[in-house]
Amino acid sequence: AFQENEIKLLTAEIERLKNFGCLGVSPSLEGLRDENAKLKYRLNFLQKSLQEERSKTVKSMININSRLQEIFGVAIQAAYPDLENPPLVVTPSQQPKFGDYQCNSAMGITQILLKTKEQKVSPREIAEKITKNIPANDCIEKVEIAGPGFINVHLRKDFVSKQLSSLLINGVQPPAVGKRKKVVVDFSSPNIAKEMHVGHLRSTIIGESMCRLFEFAGYDVLRLNHLGDWGTQFGMLIAHLQDKFPDYLTVSPPIGDLQAFYKESKRRFDTEEEFKKRAYQCVVLLQSKNPDFIKAWELICDVSRKEFQKIYNCLDITLIERGESFYHEMMKDIVKEFEDKGFVQVDDGRKIVFVPGFPVPLTIMKSDGGYTYDTSDLAALKHRLCEEKADILIYVVDSGQSVHLQTVFAAGQMIGWYDPKVTRVAHAAFGVVLGEDKKKFKTRSGDTVRLIDLLEEGLKRAMDKLKDKERDKVLTEDELKAAQTSVAFGCIKYADLSHNRLNDYVFSFDKMLDDRGNTAAYLLYAFTRIRAIARLANIDEQMLRKAAMEEVVILDHEKEWKLGKCILRFPEILQKILEDLLLHTLCDYLYELATTFTEFYDNCYCVEKDRQSGQIVKVNMWRLLLCEATATVMAKGFDILGIKPVQRM
């Protein structure tokens, strides 16, 4: 409707405008002297542009829930034109007898009419009025009013069939989300000179998956790794480096175990007064950009980077490093800006900022003139908003930082860096990883679990599981290796993402490697099985593509119908996650899709064989197309979750 309206408006505009200058001149038009020719050229150009836009829109997967909301929005507006922002509630039906979707707005409208107009109208009467005003559309077969005023919606089979054909021809396309926005995601963010541990696992996995989702939806995404690469701890590390490797400026120091190196320097800092004094001097020299100390700092950072990259390679994580040091030069301006606007108070020599609604102030300068995490976080926030021009800014940081981050966000709002009505700044908080004893996940000796050890253990256990199933006897060496990494890292990621990120979750290799229930092992196996159906029927990709163009996807069997609708719910699932940033919804959907497929496969023959000879007698191509559509959606779901399926398992 928007595109049609646009064409009418532009055509009317061209008819109205006689002066071509009002329409804009491009260098390629300078040679055209005749005004009519110019007008025709411009009209053709505009119409061609709109056709291109229209073709893009057609390729986007339709969010059926949103389409129904539009339809019922028009119906409610027509039925009750005086109501401002009436409730619009459309959800998938839980049982087939209640149709495919339900509109449950009538109950809410009853309450509004009672409160604002003192009119007592039954929800059923309101539902009847709404249904009478439903505009002509291509997706609703019929509506029924049930119970007190639920409107049950039955979709048209030909509409669902067409959407499935479009999916098969065009591939899984993102739902239309409007203007392309800039999204900045801050995630992972380990500290230099400390090894990544299990606490970094959640931020890294959740952040990567969020980036993949926003990228798929067509946003411009900046993935930032806010490394802890600056601060007083570098004084003790540099002092220890000078003592242990005095020729570090000319010979690269062989720091094998940076964690042990950090512990040694910390022990000396806590027990040796002279060392402590020298460490403080090193900080001053580092912050004054002394070349020798910058070199020492870079050496330590490089050792850490290499260790972090091993983990990022394993988990297929992409990040741009932009640590605290990046913002160091901006911090004095941050302090000045808060001072100039009268927000700074002095407390025992510290410069602090109270933010309305938050009891603990931000310390933006220490009494010794040094900056704090508060200062660097404010500098990062301003840079992301004012320099990167982020429309959406997401911090994937543990729940323990919630009050701190909300205070920083509120300070940015208070000083005028952003308006929350225009720019979305969100803390995507998450709980902690627990051991099977329901306590914080630790090693037997009580140490924090190193992330690299956890990943190596995952690989070992995945291989053991595959050998238990005797997969080593049927897969080639390369296939077995691919299955091992797919299962190991897929299961670790999925175990995290399938839980509501706001909750703590129990880390259990036994549960995550179980090939029954809502696990990556089950889904990966289901996926390889679905992909194998066409292959075993000797139907290749080209034949499936040809069938998608020519065949109608029949949905007469109740299990075909159930599966078809489930496949097409993918865009609305993604839209919901773009709004609430809760990725477990996608995991729940993929599990539902896999189990719905199993119901379909058990009840509907895709390939019919002779019972005696085992020869293929008949291939039901429309059902193979349903298999292909299921696998295509699952593959995109896996991609968003950062899971790599394999063809054979």
Image: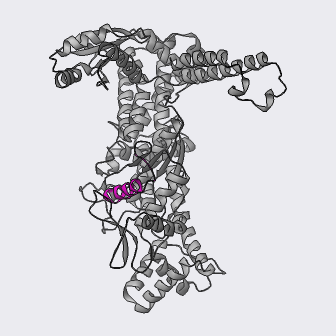
Location of residue 574 in the rendering, given as x and y in whole percent from the top left corner? 42, 33
Q: Main secondary structure of the magenta part?
A: helix
Q: Which residue is more in the foreground, 485 or 389?
A: 389
Any magenta on residue 412?
Answer: yes
Task: Give the quarter of the image for residue 288.
Answer: bottom right
Q: How many marks?
A: 0
Instruction: Left or right? Give the position of 587 relative to 387.
Output: left
Is 476 placed above or below 596 here? below
The furthest residue to the bottom: 274
Q: Which residue is more in the foreground, 36 or 498?
A: 36
Q: Residue at x 49, y 40 (%)?
A: 214
Task: Give the quarter of the image for residue 88.
Answer: top left
The furthest residue to the front: 19
Any magenta on residue 563?
Answer: no
- In this orientation, does residue 148 appear? no
Task: Give the quarter of the image for residue 130.
Answer: top left
Location of residue 98 in the rendering, given as x and y in whole percent from the top left corner? 26, 15
Is 611 placed above or below 184 here? above
Q: Which residue is more in the foreground, 84 or 134?
A: 84
Location of residue 607 in the rendering, given as x and y in whole percent from the top left corner? 47, 15
Is 253 placed above or below 604 here? below
Location of residue 540 in the rendering, given as x and y in whole percent from the top left corner? 59, 22
Residue range in magenta is: 402-420
